[in-house]
Amino acid sequence: MSSFKQIVELIADDLTAVEAKLTEQTASEYSFVDMAVQHVVEGGGKRLRPILVVLSAKVCGYEGSDAHTLAAVVELIHVASLVHDDVLDEAAIRRGRETLQTKWGNKVAVLVGDYLHARVLSMLVARRADDPAMAILADTTQAMCEGEVIHAYKSGDFDISEDEYLKIISFKTGKLIAASCTLGAHLGTTDKQRLEALTTYGQQIGTAFQIVDDVLDFTEDTDKLGKNTFGDLREGKLTFPIIYARSVCNDNEKQTLEKVLNPNTDEAEAIAFVEALFQRYGVEAHCLKVAQNYADRAKAALTVLPEIPARVALEQLADYVVSRES
Amino acid sequence: MSSFKQIVELIADDLTAVEAKLTEQTASEYSFVDMAVQHVVEGGGKRLRPILVVLSAKVCGYEGSDAHTLAAVVELIHVASLVHDDVLDEAAIRRGRETLQTKWGNKVAVLVGDYLHARVLSMLVARRADDPAMAILADTTQAMCEGEVIHAYKSGDFDISEDEYLKIISFKTGKLIAASCTLGAHLGTTDKQRLEALTTYGQQIGTAFQIVDDVLDFTEDTDKLGKNTFGDLREGKLTFPIIYARSVCNDNEKQTLEKVLNPNTDEAEAIAFVEALFQRYGVEAHCLKVAQNYADRAKAALTVLPEIPARVALEQLADYVVSRES
């Protein structure tokens, strides 16, 4: 059995409770809204963020239903961001299913994303007044938007450095993954060292996760990904593998690479050039090594926590983030 | 001097403080985000919702800076919804300025809307733990999205009744206008009768406001509106005047009307037909009469409140909502 399946099995009851919360907390009196929301919420996905909330709570000694509510909250924020991304990337499929805008148009899709955010706010309001979750998530959603705006704004800017890109993805992806861990930890502990350990763990695997996501866009086939391979490339998005390749290739290749990232270039030609370039400079292996370094730092942060099954699961999860195939 | 100018003059200091909050509370460490946000936040607009917060607070005896924060909050929610609407309506201008997607593309525009929502959450988090604002606004933003989703979903459905439409606009537009009044009132009173009076006032002028908005789309010229006249019509949006016209015209006209709402119909032809139809059945006058009825009910709700300048201003505002030309 894969390590990911083992982790899911360890917390199967919790994940069932999270799914129930997701359905219950997004219900609308309008059946159409219900249907559209369920289409995206049930769209599969690995539920990485809920798993992190539950495991972070457990490793800090908390077992209870508050973890399921917060797990649903972070998943809904994540789903809302995917729904908006799909509109803007004009994606036709996501996780092997038609996207909302394919089924019902752009307007419905943007508004369903907004609706999910509104439900998140309702869920947070219903909690304790002294709950740190709201402040953590206010900060997180703001950073996610800033990261996304800057990434969108910088698209087409070839001079983006590895450091700039890493900062953008720490905002875009890392913040919500780190918040998932911090929120779970807060349920079980007020110990600063443990809280910081789990936040650091989340930040590191968040960066690893996004780098691997970037790599999979080039290496996995559409069936496994549940979305189109080379999607980022065809949208002219600069991602980690391209930024690295650009930093090591020669001036001629650099010029061709810029041409290839222009969506007007013939697609087959663009893909063939990039594949050859990546082969030549070992780009995939390099990126996965960088991602593994982040995963290793994530695991190292966990040493202040007790060696119980939840900690082992978090360690396995860090490696899974790098070794996954979709 | 127009009654609207008088109202603005009465609370000029408050409105200056609200503008300062709007700038201060949307600041980002990324200068590009800052610039994009300021472009929409400074885009003018009548600041109807902030005015309602301030006047509702004053009529309930409150004078203080909390009203400015809540006024900024409701205005940002409103601006965020406009930014998303513009993306989906593919609007090129709003309030006489280029829209975000015209300047920087769809992606930036959707994300700036999301960013404004995130900032709203931050502003609410920073307030008192026992603050009712968060719960009111969670409910409000959810209803706004539901109303918008249903309106988008129903576009092209000619059988929508006046009642169904009025329910949709009470969600889409009325809820936030009502919330502006309720939030202001909460600052000054816990008296149930007064709170309900201001909520009712807000709901009624909200409906009046949207009906007049619908009418202005057909009757005002582009310069005054700051957006394209007949915009709703050309998007095939069913609005109040069309729903009323459809309910009184004959079968032949009904069939032509459905053709005209199809964006493939020649624009000049569509406009000429609708203008003649509206003339024939006195559609504009009827709609404005309906709107005035809502405004009158709004004013009637205020009788439980003391007859101080803030109440007079709210009464004048109800009439202004119907008589305005943009």
Image (cartoon, coloured by chain):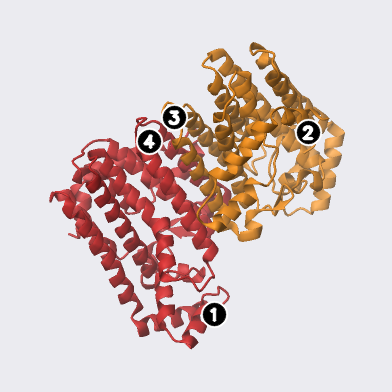
Chain colours: A orange, B red
The answer for which chain carries disc 1 is: B
Callout 4 secondary element: helix
Residue A89 lies, in percent from the top left, at 65, 50
Read off the residue under disc 1: B259
**Label 2 in the same subunit as label 3:** yes
Q: Distance between the residues labelled 3 and 4?
A: 29 Å
Callout 2 secondary element: loop
Q: Mark 1 or mark 3, which is nearer to you?
A: 3
**Label 4 in the same subunit as label 2:** no
- What's the residue at 59%, 45% (across, down)? A23
Q: Which mark, by number, is residue A128? A: 3
Q: Distance between the residues labelled 1 and 2?
A: 53 Å
Q: Mark 3 or mark 4, which is nearer to you?
A: 3
Read off the residue under disc 2: A324
The crowding category of the residue bearing disc 2, from other C-alpha atoms within 10 Å (few below 14, some 14 to 19, many at least 20), is few
Q: Residue type at mark 1: give it.
A: Lys
Read off the residue under disc 4: B24
Callout 3 secondary element: loop
The crowding category of the residue bearing disc 4, from other C-alpha atoms within 10 Å (few below 14, some 14 to 19, many at least 20), is few
Callout 1 secondary element: helix
Q: Residue type at mark 4: give it.
A: Glu
The answer for which chain carries disc 3 is: A
